[in-house]
Image: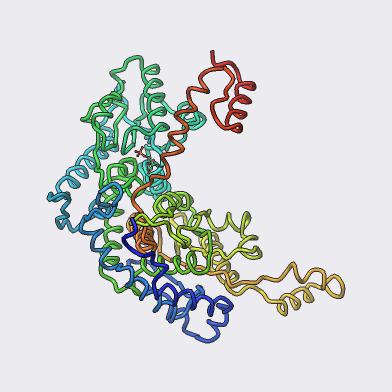
Amino acid sequence: MFMNKLISQSHIWNSLKNHQKYLAPVQMKDLFALDEHRYENFSIEACDLLLDYSKNRLTKDTLNLLQQFAEKVELNSWVKKLFNGELVNNTERRAALHIALRNRSNTPIIVNGKDVMPGVNEVLDRMRKFSNSVRDGNWRGYTGKHIENIVNIGIGGSDLGPAMVARALRIYQHPRLQSYFVSNVDNSHLGDILTKINPETTLFIIASKTFTTQETILNAQTARRWLIEQLGNDEAVAKHFVAVSTATKKVTEFGIDPVNMFEFWDWVGGRYSLWSAIGLPISVMIGMERFEELLAGAHKLDQHFATAPLLKNLPVLMALIDVWYSSFFGTTSQVILPYDYTLKLFPAYLQQLVMESLGKRVTRDGNIVDYATCPVIWGAPGNNGQHAFYQLLHQGTHIIPTDFIVAIESHYDLSEHQDAVLSNALAQSHALMMGRNLEKTKQNLLNMGIEGEELSKQLPHRVFPGNQPSNTILYKKLTPEILGTLIALYEHKVFVQSVCWGINPFDQWGVELGKNVASTLLPALRVDTHNNAHDSSTNGLLNYIKAHRHSVL
Ligand code: F6P
């Protein structure tokens, strides 16, 4: 288990540690003062995205050290392994080939001696036919009506990706169709939606890679029971339920005809699966042509990632900068701020993509790390954040690297609104970087007529320390292609970070314990008897619940 030393024992790691000590007190505003071309020297345009990484606490020396770090961890070789379908998911002995799902150049990709592309294309063809039949009105429900409501039942990667994309691309959706994404097992989620939809015009998509996830199966069973009750015959299921899964047998056992099942494969990770048949609600809502534009955008980024030199490589740059903060500045969170409201679900989507991939403490070789890995990922649409948590960003005690994701134009364009979005986005990243020092704050308060003792009292509360780092990503307008590029950018950024930290980003053993304990508590909740089989807190909580709810008998 101790085959390789931790990367933190390497010479380059030590060089980066020393370099951080030198840079820690350096103010970014001074770096800008020293180089009037800092923006030009620390920004890059590729795949119709502009990345401005100049507002970061780094210099060209930093980037050179980070490049040496990337070379030390053999990044290029790992990228080749990923693209060649090698078993990069070492604990599950699987490939991670989400790039095959959007491999628009159709070059063969071999897994276990077999080209996976024919299978990928066969499923895309089935998705196209099905999406067209629902959109054209040819797919009819049990009572002969066409479909109006698409209800996707899934959770985690079987929900967050499709829900985020459907929301982001709502401007492209079919006018007759409305999509709903049910994930939580609390019946206030599904139950609320069932009161709003007409069973005759509703199509349920049960999305689950394993088809064993408790929340999804329970919701699917409740939805199935509701539909049969509403339409009076279990033969209605075939017309109102389809499944997306790798588990054909379990889908059949549930009562969905395999003819209505869209398959994907175990080399597709749940949080990397929206490009597969898990994306069916997307292709139904926006049409297969637009879905394929999404795939094409991701493919464009894939090609960039596989070929661009390290310091001209968008996901590599973003990843190295984040490793620089997490492992050398000791930052513990990163905030995602879309200044494009259609991306309102993007932070939540990234929470799973990043934290379920990188929230680990053991390397591929089984060694416990002695350095920080994944930061906490959080965020909200920028302007909302300004009225919620920016106080902490501007005057708190944490260094919190920020990604500003900004659309130059909106599909809902009212120039006055869009100018407000843009001015706020640029103002915030500027203010976070520049801050406002004592002298300028004093002048500001004097100009407001605050002077003497009151001025002395106010001053310490009104200063902005600044030096908060941020990236700004700009794109012209959020099209399916741009969205595909943006998502793939973060997927590959996560992969690069995993290589830097020596961890496997494609398994998720950490989700098992909670599930197992929950299954032992279920029986205890099914009886009214006093509970003392667990720790005193769990016993106390269980017994309090039983004393304060209606009897289950
Ligand atoms: O959160 C654990 C997890 O396995 C995720 O990785 C996955 O996306 C989600 O649950 C749903 O899994 P499934 O698609 O198999 O229902």
Image quarter for ligand 1 equals: top left
Q: 398 or 179: which is nearer to us? A: 398
The quarter holding residue 254 reads top left
Say whether residue 300 is visible: yes
Q: Residue at x 29, y 68 (%)?
A: 74
Q: 107 or 474: which is nearer to us? A: 107
Say whether residue 419 is visible: no
Residue 552 drawn at (x, y percent) = 54, 16
- Which part of the image, by quadrant, shows the C terminus? top right
- Which part of the image, by quadrant, shows the N terminus? bottom left
Q: 307 or 228: which is nearer to us? A: 307
Residue 320 drawn at (x, y percent) = 41, 68
Q: How many marks?
A: 0
Q: Residue at x 32, y 27 (%)?
A: 240
Residue 5 drawn at (x, y percent) = 36, 65
Which residue sits furthest top? Answer: 553
The quarter holding residue 225 reads top left
Q: Residue at x 35, y 48 (%)?
A: 507
Q: 39 or 535: which is nearer to us? A: 535
Which residue sits furthest right? Answer: 453
Residue 264 drawn at (x, y percent) = 25, 42
In the figure, 9 relative to 291: above or below?
Answer: below
In the figure, 184 relative to 545: above or below?
Answer: below
422 with respect to 510 (left or right) = right
